Amino acid sequence: MMTWRKASYSGAGGTEECVEVARLSETIAVRDSKNPEAEHLELPHHAFAALLDHLKSYRPTT
C-alpha cells in the first residue's frame, strides 16, 4: 500500500485543489487528491527531481 502525502505547495488559499505524492522504491507516484481512485503517474526519482526544478523556476507569461 502506498502512503500518500499532500504536496507542500498545493491548496494555497484554502482550496481543495492539490497534488499528492508517494515515495516508492524506484519511483515517485503523483495523483490528484480530488480523484484518489483514478490512475496515478509514476516517475523515476531523477525525473521527478527535474520536474520539481522546472516547476520551481516556472514564470507564467501574461
Image (tube, rainbow, N blue to C red):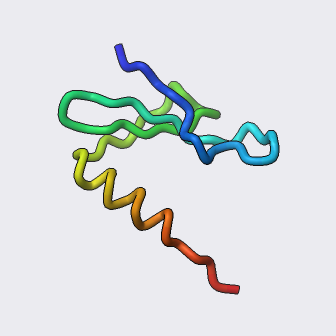
**Point 49% across, 71% down: residue:** 57
Q: Residue furthest bottom?
A: 62
31 or 51, nearer to the observer: 51
Image quarter of residue 28: top left
Q: Residue furthest left?
A: 26
Judged left or right of residue 48, residue 31 is right
Residue 16 at x, y percent in the picture: 73, 37
Residue 2 at x, y percent in the picture: 37, 19
Residue 27 at x, y percent in the picture: 25, 38
Residue 1 at x, y percent in the picture: 35, 13
Image quarter of residue 10: top right
Residue 26 in the image: above or below residue 49: above
16 or 52, nearer to the observer: 52
6 or 37, nearer to the observer: 6
17 or 55, nearer to the observer: 55
Residue 35 in the image: above or below residue 58: above
**Point 33% across, 51% down: residue:** 48
Total marks in image: 0
**Point 22% across, 46% down: residue:** 44
Judged left or right of residue 2, residue 61 is right
Image quarter of residue 11: top right
Quadrant where the C terminus lies?
bottom right
Q: Residue furthest top?
A: 1
Judged left or right of residue 24, residue 29 is right
